[in-house]
Amino acid sequence: MGILLFIIFGFVVGLLARALLPGRQKMGLLATTGLGVAGSFLGGFLVALVTHNRVADFNTAGMIGSIVGAILLLVIGSRFSRRDGVLA
């Protein structure tokens, strides 16, 4: 998979993760893309642990794992975000 396709896929995964998670996430386009790319790596590793697929393989389990990974990163990030100077 080419790097440009991976970045576009990461952006789409980031958008889907933000749409599926309730609440408002204050992120720009670059942060959403970074979230999707990191979620793809995390989801790819989680799927690779359960199945015999490689991390970089493009399949349905990898797509679902990418979205789940991005949602996990959003949840973890929201737990450590600062609101009004106090950790949430």
Image (tube, helix red, strand yellow):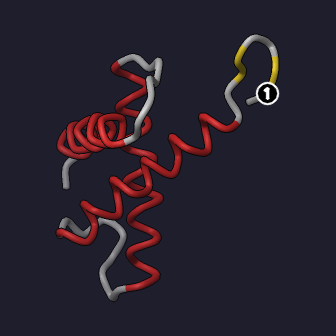
| Up/down of 78 relative to 85, above or below | below
Which residue occupies 28% across, 34% down? 15
Q: The residue under label 1 is which amino acid type? A: Leu
Q: Quadrant of residue 30?
A: top left
The residue tagged with tag 1: helix, strand or loop? strand
Name the image quarter holding residue 13: top left
Which residue in the rendered view is the most extreme toward the top?
A: 84
Q: Nearer the viewer, residue 30 or 79?
A: 79
In percent of width and height, residue 23 lies at 44, 29
Position of the C terminus, as image quadrant, is top right
Kindly identify the residue that appears in the image at 36 percent across and 35 percent down.
Answer: 18
Q: Which residue lies furthest to the front in this view?
A: 22
Image x and y of residue 85, in percent? 80, 13
Above or below, 21 relative to 42: above
Count the labels in the image: 1
| Residue at x 47%, y 18% (from the top left corner) | 26
Tell whether 79 sits left or right of 22.
right
Give how far across and how far down residue 50 sits, in percent: 42, 84
Question: In the displayed structure, does residue 79 sit left or right of residue 61?
Answer: right
Q: Report the quarter where the N terminus lies.
A: bottom left
Q: Is residue 85 above or below residue 54?
A: above
Instruction: Identify which residue, 64 or 41, lies in the foreground.
Output: 64
Name the residue beneath numbered marker 1: 87
Residue at left 55%, top 44%? 75
